């Protein structure tokens, strides 16, 4: 069972995931609660964290996949319209991320290089473990870049680049 590619992918995913965790910590509370282009900062973060939880799962069936359940009023849809009365605190987001990280570590522990190319949806080769994981890395980084831009415009600290194979400066 070879794991060279699997471990390289895990390192990339974990580096990306760490940047998501740092983003929660560096965001001031007033920015966390504010809306930008009609979407609250916390909602933009919930959007991509929810999809990490959705796509990174043990089984791709109708079983429960959620690591933390919020009220059904919470949606990952950025264009839902009204977020009035809804709010996910930074502490709740940290807990959600921590729970997801336990799940993703377990998933990576069970993968190997051969299984990365295995279809998760029947014979559909567009949905392999590799596709799902690399797609999540791209989705997370897109959203971190967007949210970092909001922080940067305000002269605030942001979630700096983190890579597992580079010394921290």
Image (cartoon, rainbow, N blue to C red):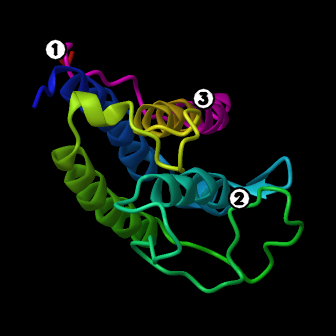
Tell me whether the residue at label 2 lies in contact with that at label 1, contact meaning CB atoms closer than 8 angstroms. Answer: no
Earlier-in-chain disc, 3 versus 2: 2
Magenta residues span: 141-166
Circle 3 packing at 10 Å, graded few (<14), some (14-19), many (20+), is few
Q: CA distance from mark 3 to mark 2?
A: 15 Å
Residue at left offset 54%, top offset 34%: 135
Callout 1: helix, strand or loop? loop
Tell which circle, 2 or 1, labels the residue nearer the N-terminal end.
2
Under circle 2, the secondary element is: loop
Q: Which residue is mark 3?
A: 152
In x, y percent, where is residue 108? 23, 44
The residue carrying mark 1 is: 167
Q: Identify the residue shown where x is 32% and y is 27%.
A: 12
Q: Nearer the viewer, residue 60 or 35?
A: 60
Can you say whether 83 is above or below 71 in the image? above
Which quadrant does the C terminus fall into?
top left
Q: Is residue 57 above or below residue 68?
A: above
């Amino acid at each position: 069972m070879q794991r060279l590619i699997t471990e390289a992918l895990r390192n990339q995913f974990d580096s990306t995931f760490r940047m998501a965790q740092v983003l929660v910590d560096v965001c001031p509370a007033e920015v966390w609660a504010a809306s930008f282009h009609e979407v609250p900062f916390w909602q933009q973060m919930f959007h991509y964290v929810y999809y990490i939880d959705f796509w990174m799962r043990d089984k791709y069936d109708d079983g429960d996949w959620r690591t933390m359940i919020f009220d059904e009023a919470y949606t990952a849809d950025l264009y839902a319209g009204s977020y009035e009365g809804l709010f996910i605190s930074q502490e709740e987001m940290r807990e959600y991320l921590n729970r997801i990280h336990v799940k993703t570590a377990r998933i990576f522990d069970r993968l190997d290089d051969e299984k990365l190319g295995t279809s998760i949806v029947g014979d559909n080769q567009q949905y392999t473990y590799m596709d799902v994981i690399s797609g999540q890395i791209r989705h997370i980084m897109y959203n971190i870049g967007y949210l970092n831009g909001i922080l940067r415009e305000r002269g605030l600290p942001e979630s700096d680049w983190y890579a597992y194979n580079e010394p921290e400066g």
